[in-house]
Amino acid sequence: MLFHSTFRAELSRYFWATLVILVSIVMTVLLIRTLGQASRGNIDPREVTLVLGYTVLGNMHTIVTMALYIASVATLSRMYADSEMVIWQSSGESSAGLVQPALVFAAPALVVVAALALVAWPWTNAQTHEIRDRYEKRGDLERVKPGQFQESASGNRVFFIDKDSPSDLEGTHIFIAAQEKGLQTITSARRGRVEFKADDRYLVLNDGQRIEVNPLKNEIKVIEFQEHGARLGNTTLALDEIEAQSTLPWDLLKNPIPVNMGELTWRIGLALGAFNLVLLGIAIPYINPRTGRTGALVMAMLTFFIYYNLINVSRNAVASGQWGMVSMLLALHLPVFGLSLLGLWWRSEQTSLLHLLQKLVFFKREAA
């Protein structure tokens, strides 16, 4: 059918053009963020490109959804602005008639969004966390170059180890300046070594001195020690939220704790949201050629950001135990679906909101 094929062809042009632009913008923003993480010592500078690729792939579900929505809004806006939609309507077509070609075009993209949200998102997160965790396991001592002062990854410590240190796990003439919890500490020792106990690592210093300065109380404390130990941190990653983001959906269902259900609610919501946004992209745009496109485009973008933020809020609501997964999905996405259908019917009726209310009131009076 000419009407359907013309609409799909224009949707395709807008979709691919928008997708290329959005990917370019997102890659630029994420590249700056990734370089910042590398400069702070959170990731290995040699793996910046790999982390960037995983991050872009993990966010592709949002990019594809936005490209679909913008393509629908831009196509309909152009058709209304050029009075092309009026010509199609005079020949018997309606806004509701655009749903079929739009869904036919969007079906492959919707499948891709669902796959990206359910499978690609946890896989890319797992890979990124593995790279970051592997690099962070080096710890502060491994960052130290013998014979040079070196700042820690967090920026609150400065280390120095003599260049004649015997091995990577042992050092001589150690100097550590740190600032933690309002205290300024300077620790020096003749020798030091790293010991492993279970999942923890400990720095053991021998024959040294520790100076603690409390600027608030104007106190200085000097401690001399023969042996001093400090815990360097846990090498395991046990945060529930991070683990949930890196877990496949069927594994989340096997362990239905609130955090896992919140993550699954968010992923399913992304797929349902992409479907609803295709319908909203047809129902919302309406442009009077005399007034221009600005109002309709602003309304469309506000709708997208509000809806997408509500999807993000739904994850926290379920993760905190305030909502169940099924009830949250129905409460959020079913009303949007209903409003989309109402908007399509309204556009097909080609009436104003006031006239529509008058017709409803008249219908109630006739029924009475």
Image (tube, rainbow, N blue to C red):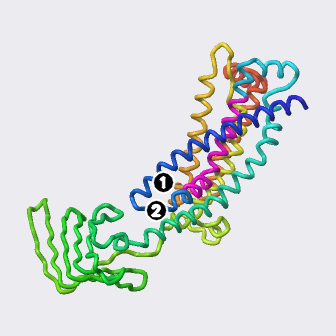
Q: Residue furthest front?
A: 164
Packing grade of label 2 (10 A; few <14, some 14-19, many >=20) is: many
* Image position of 172 (left or right of 292): left
Mark 1 secondary-structure assignment: helix
Quarter of the figure with the N terminus: top right
Write the start and end of the magenta stretch as one range.
52-75
Q: Is residue 79 above or below residue 177?
A: above
Look at the picture and state if 315 lies above or below 231. above
Query: Which residue: 54% across, 59% down?
Result: 51
Element under disc 2: loop
Q: CA distance from mark 1 to mark 2?
A: 8 Å
| Residue 211 in picture, x, y percent from top left | 14, 72
Q: Quadrant of residue 73?
A: top right
Q: Is residue 353 above or below residue 173?
A: above
- Report x, y in % for residue 307: 59, 42
Front residue of 60/280: it is 60
Pick the front one: 126 or 361: 126
Residue denoted by label 2: 43
Which residue is label 1 attached to? 34
Percent position of residue 56, x then y? 59, 52
Q: How many marks?
A: 2
Residue 153 placement: quadrant: bottom left
- Magenta region, main secondary structure: helix
| Residue at the image point whose x is 65% and y is 41% from the top | 20
Would you say the residues marked 1 and 2 are in contact, meaning their CB atoms lie under 8 Å apart? Answer: yes
Whether the magenta-drawn stretch holds residue 29 is answered as no
Q: Amino acid at mark 1?
A: Thr
Q: Looking at the image, which residue is at 44% across and 56% down?
A: 37
Pick the front one: 46 or 28? 46
Which residue occupies the foreground of this view, 21 or 249?
21
